[in-house]
Amino acid sequence: MRGEADTEIDPLKHPLAMFGLHRRTALLTGSSSGIGLALARGFLAAGARVVLNGRDPEKLLRAQQALEALAPASGMVSSHGFDVTDPDAIAVAVQALESKLGGIDILVNNAGVTFRAPLDTYSNAQWQQVMRTNLDSAFYVARAVVPGMKARGHGKIINMCSVLSESSRAGTAPYSASKGGLKMLTKGMAVDWARYGIQVNGIGPGYIQTEFTQALSGDPKFNDWLIDHTPAGRWGQVQDLVGAGIFLASDASAFVNGHVLYVDGGLTAAL
């Protein structure tokens, strides 16, 4: 939890202290692997207590055990496997976490899914799953944690957007629609909740090498296109997102609201 000392940091005397997450509790959805797990590990190293979330109980347990091996003290890592597309399950889970942990200070909405296919071949079920997982879940989970943040007068919400919040490619239209919607939901959340001491921002990853992008990284044609069009000349790695996550979760971003920070090696600048 946040302590009084956190509000007394003079950024001119102790600039690095502003990036600390000590006495903060962070809930990260979709964090049993990939980007979510990397952010959880970074938050843990910055002093936060982290709560992992995912759909696969065994995978979630393995992720928890891996982070517990790195934790500076017991009780710094836990997991809760609720369904982020089920508003009722979310309400029950958040209430339990608030009661057990004393409050959620940081929320990262990272759960996501896609099906790469021509738009006219998308089934109703596929469209609905993409929207529920990528967009609806961010609203549901944020809505559940915000009352506690408002009561405490502070909170950080980070929505995982994408370079496809700004553009699209063949076969990605539903995903782009969901991530474009998430960008605007981020702005709307910031406008509604800033007055309560809550900052809501997004991270827009470029093409990051994870299980999620394995098919793309293994496609020589796409790989060549990406390297050619990304000024940095490489794929992103999950660790490239940790600094942005800590910045947006910490007091260093206390006056940053409604912003999407693109971590893409310059891809959006070059499009």
Image (tube, rainbow, N blue to C red):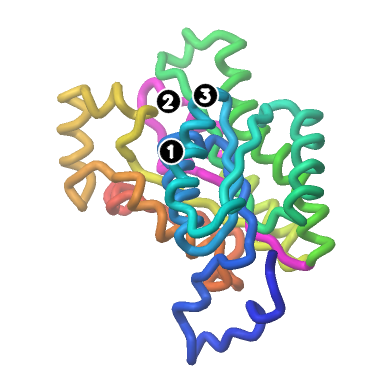
Q: Secondary structure at mark 2?
A: loop
Residue at point 48% right, 51% down?
203
Residue 203 drawn above or below residue 194: above
Give left or right: position of 125 versus 94: left
* Picture coordinates of residue 17, whole percent (x, y): 50, 78
Q: Is residue 63 magenta?
A: no
Residue at point 71% right, 59% down?
191
Residue 271 drawn above or below residue 170: below
Given residues 149 and 168, the one toward you in this image is 149
Q: CA distance from mark 2 to mark 1?
A: 8 Å
Q: Residues within 10 Å of mark 3 (few under 14, many from 20)?
A: few
Quarter the N terminus occupies: bottom right
Q: Which residue is mark 2?
A: 172
- Tag shown at residue 58: 3
Q: Is residue 160 magenta?
A: yes
Give left or right: position of 99 versus 70: right
Q: Are marks 2 and 1 in contact (CB under 8 Å)?
A: yes
Q: Secondary structure at mark 3?
A: helix
Residue 42: quadrant of the picture: bottom left
* Picture coordinates of residue 158, whole percent (x, y): 57, 52
Given residues 220 and 61, the one toward you in this image is 61
Which stretch did the figure color magenta? 153-180
* Picture coordinates of residue 78, whole percent (x, y): 60, 43
Q: Answer with mark 2 or mark 1, whichever residue precedes in sequence.
A: 1
Q: Which residue is mark 1?
A: 164
**What kind of residue is marked 2?**
Thr
Q: Are marks 1 and 3 in contact (CB under 8 Å)?
A: no
- One can see residue 243 in this view: yes
